[in-house]
Image (tube, helix red, strand yellow):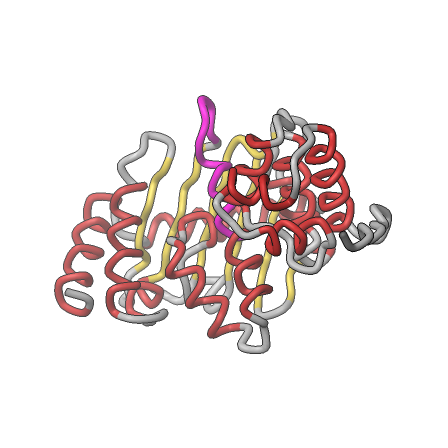
Amino acid sequence: MPATKPLDPRASLAAYLGSRVRKLREALGLTQKQLGILVHVSHNRIAQIELATDPPTMALAEAIDLALEADGEITDLWWHMTRETYVDWAREFMDKEARAVKMLKYTAQSVPGLLQTPAYARASLSEGLPHLSAEELDRQVDARLSRRVLLEGAEPPFLWTVLDQDALHRRVGEKITMHEQLSYLLKVAKRPHITLQVLPFEAEQHPITGGSLTLLSLRDGPDVAYLEGYDSGELVEVPERVTRYAHAYDLLQVHALTPAASELLIRDTMKEHYS
């Protein structure tokens, strides 16, 4: 039998996750093949995870956690590992987003990440970042979709989203991808803690035209604003600037369609363009 390759858990979070999987697996007396059978993958896939050459997806991390009786340790490590996918300014924003009790979001060109379907997220990432390998694309998609858990649970934050009508017409992926995405928007808009408005084409010019804005109200700190563009982002914490962006968001809400009219527009767009 070949010698077990040594692991360096200090090399990265993926390496640390892999080392913990190996230690927990060996403590239970399981081979890589036996663990693979339990989680429905090959023993080579388990080896890749332990050696950190191809970290697990969220679903696989959860399955391994359950099989190894890890009590959430592996899934917790997966969450921290996926944060490495994002640059520093994005991680700082995500930390605050996870503590928010209220989120106000505006996006001009696309559906915000928290409300994206798996197919839409994959198409958006593959089109926007064509250099990604298949494995890295999988990790990016998993990382984006994992953030949707923020809207679940017993006490989810209140989310108010103003979506530019252009985002409904800008096709991402295939027609079925857009149909599923718009259907999902209609579904989540029914939740009591989510409000969705569409800013129509005929609305007046506004201060955030062409960009995106998120305002966060935190349970344990002052409100913050987050501006994001292509490959860039800025977390704003200066109270005076946050107040100005909050006023700009108020103007968006005034000029946007009502939630009921927004729902009707989304349904009409589905029928006309993505049936």
Residue 245 shows up from this direction: no
Magenta span has 148? Answer: yes
Residue 137 shows up from this direction: yes
- The residue located at (25%, 64%) in the rendering is 176
- The residue located at (79%, 52%) in the rendering is 12
Residue 95 placement: quadrant: top right
Residue closest to the eye, 46 or 94: 46
Q: Position of residue 102 (x, y in %)?
A: 50, 34
Residue closest to the eye, 208 or 77: 77
Taking the view exactly as shown, the residue that stands out farthest to the top is 154
Taking the view exactly as shown, the residue that stands out farthest to the front is 1
Per the picture, the main secondary structure of the magenta-coloured stretch is helix
User: Is 266 left, or right, of 159 in this rendering?
Assistant: left
- Residue 60's place in the image compared with 117, above or below, is above
Residue 193 placement: quadrant: top left
User: Is 27 left, or right, of 41 in this rendering?
Assistant: right
Magenta span has 113? Answer: no
Residue closest to the eye, 235 or 191: 191
- The residue located at (33%, 68%) in the rendering is 166
Q: Position of residue 174 (x, y in %)?
A: 29, 71
Q: Position of residue 204 (x, y in %)?
A: 35, 64
Q: Quadrant of the C terminus?
A: bottom left
User: Which span of residues is magenta-colored?
Assistant: 144-156
- The residue located at (86%, 48%) in the rendering is 10
Q: Position of residue 54 (x, y in %)?
A: 65, 58
- Residue 135's place in the image compared with 182, above or below, is below
